Structures are given as structure tokens and as C-alpha cells.
Image (cartoon, grey):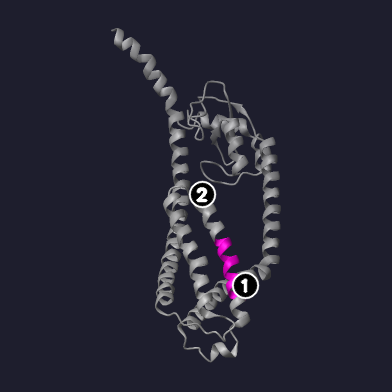
Amino acid sequence: MDSTVNSEPLLNTQNANFPQLRRQRTSLRRRNADDMGQLEKFKQLKNSSQEVLIFEAILMIAFGIALMIKKDELKDCNLNPRQFVYNYTVYYLTISVAFRMFTHIAFHKNQSRFLIAYLLLTLIQLITVTCFVWYGLIFMFDSNCWDNSSNVFFLDAMIIIALGLKTWLGITILTAILILCLPVICLGICAARGQQQQQQIIKTDIIKNLFITKFDHTAFKNKECAICLEDFEDDCDVTPLPCDIRHYFHPHCITDWIKQNNTCPLCKKVISKEDMKNLEDGFSDKLEFERHRDD
């Protein structure tokens, strides 16, 4: 007997907390979906960085082998291809590969730190590649270099310059597209902001004109608010919507809802200020009809 009596308050408490638990589960599902989207983007960024790491490592090994095997230099070539390849391999590829490996090992689970390290390395690489390409372009047309164009280091230097030009060509194309599309982008942003402000004004007007009445269990058949999932208490305030007076909610619930979206949570019909103003006209007749709907 005592156990039965003691269990009743516990059951009541569980029932009272059930709507709150359902809301928490819904919020948790949305949060998990957002986290999954961010995780997928993080994986794509890591895969892209790994592909660059593999390419740079192969290039570093190839240049390193060439530097160890071939010792000859083109003394009359102002480009000095062997020294050029050596500097690129040691001061660019080696540091880049080491930094990428450190980033993947140290920050493989920390998205924010990995992104910061990735952007920092990209910026440093752009500056370094610019220096190499600029230096290479100055001397690549030296006739003494082209007279010995079969030299392996001259060919490697041309590969380095070509890779740098490819990088800057992509940046130039993206910059040109951005500049050409900038007026359209600005117009789109201004239009979106204007539309957002207009929508905010509409939502504010709707909220100001919300119709509030008392909950009447003889007319209102649904005992639970579809937004917060909590039961309506007798004589509590409810707000019906003009799309259907059977679509009613707690005033604070529907207010928070309209701030985000001015549609009915149940039928998705757009709510307007004019409809809210007209709702009160003939509401008592509609309410009376709902009382005798099942008769």
C-alpha cells in the first residue's frame, strides 16, 4: 500500500516532465543534424588537405632525388635552376608537408583549430609561391637558361613556376568573377535585407493584432498546444488563428513562432495582419458552431 501511494507522485512528476523531455529531444535532433552537416564539411576540408599533402610529398621526394643525383649547375643562367629547386624543396615543400602533417595529427578532432591552421598555411603558401613565381619569371627568359633547357633542374624550375601560375590563375579568375558579379551581389544583399525588414514589419504587425480568448473545453477539442506540447488549463488564454479557429495555441508560443515564421504551425497557411483583424468578427458564431459540431 505504501509503495503504491509513494509511486503516484513519481508518476505525476514523470507525466508533467514528459512534454519538456519531448521538446528537448526535438532540439537535440536539430542540433545533431547541424553537427552532422558541420562534420561532413570538416571531413571534406581534411580530405582536400590530405590530397594536397600527398601531392606535395611526392613532389618533394622527386625534387629531393634529383638534387641528390644531379650536382651540375648552369653557372651562366641567372635563374640558377638547381639553387632555385633546392630553395623551393627545402623552404617551401618540406615546411608545408611538415606543417600539414602536424595539423592533421594535432587537430584532427578540433575543427576550429584545424581551420585556423589550414587558413594560416594557405596564406603563407600564397605569399611564398608569389615570391618563387616572381623570381622565376624574371630570369626564365634568359637565353643562357634556354640553351641548356634539357637540364633537369631547369625543367623542375619550369614545373614550379607553372604550378605557381596555376594557383594565381585560379585566384585571378575568382577575383575577376567576384568583381564582375559584385554589383549583382550587392543588389541581392540589399534586396534580401529590404525583404527581411519588410517581413519583420509584417510579423510585428501580426503580433500586435493577435486575438486572445479564453480556453473553452466545450468548443476547443484539442487539449494540448501543438508548439510547446503542454496541456491547456481551464480559462487560460489561447490565440486562435484565422486559417481555422481549431488551430489555437498559447499566446506566448504563437508569438515566438511568428517571430520566426508567419505561417500556421499546423496547416502552414500564411498569416496576415488583415486576417487577424477580421478574426474577431463572427468569432462567437464560429465558436458556437464548434460547440455543436459533434451533435
Furthest residue toward left: 1
In this orientation, does residue 295 appear? Answer: no
Figure quadrant of residue 76: bottom right
Answer few, some or many: residues within 10 Å of disc 1's Cα (few below 14, many 20 plus, some between 14 and 19). Answer: few
The answer to whether 138 is drawn above or below residue 124 in the figure is below
**C-alpha separation, residue under disc 2 versus residue under disc 1:** 28 Å
Picture quarter with the N terminus: top left
| Mark 1: amino acid | Thr
Q: Position of residue 47 (x, y in %)?
A: 42, 60
x and y percentages locating residue 22 in the rendered image: 43, 33
Q: Position of residue 210 (x, y in %)?
A: 65, 35
**Start and end of the magenta stretch?**
122-134
Q: Along the polypeptide, which appears first: circle 2 or circle 1?
A: 2
Mark 2: few/some/many CA within 10 Å (<14, 14-19, 20+)? some
Q: Which residue is mark 1?
A: 172
Secondary structure at numbered mark 2: helix
Mark 2 against mark 1, which lies toward the viewer?
2
Q: Which residue is identified by label 2?
A: 113
- Count of number-bearing discs: 2
Q: Quadrant of the C terminus?
A: top left
Relative side of 269 to 206, left or right: left
Reply above or below: 77 against 216.
below
Q: Residue furthest bottom?
A: 147
- Is 21 located above or below residue 164 in the figure? above
On whether residue 124 falls in the magenta region, the answer is yes
Tag 2: residue type?
Arg
Chief secondary structure of the magenta portion: helix
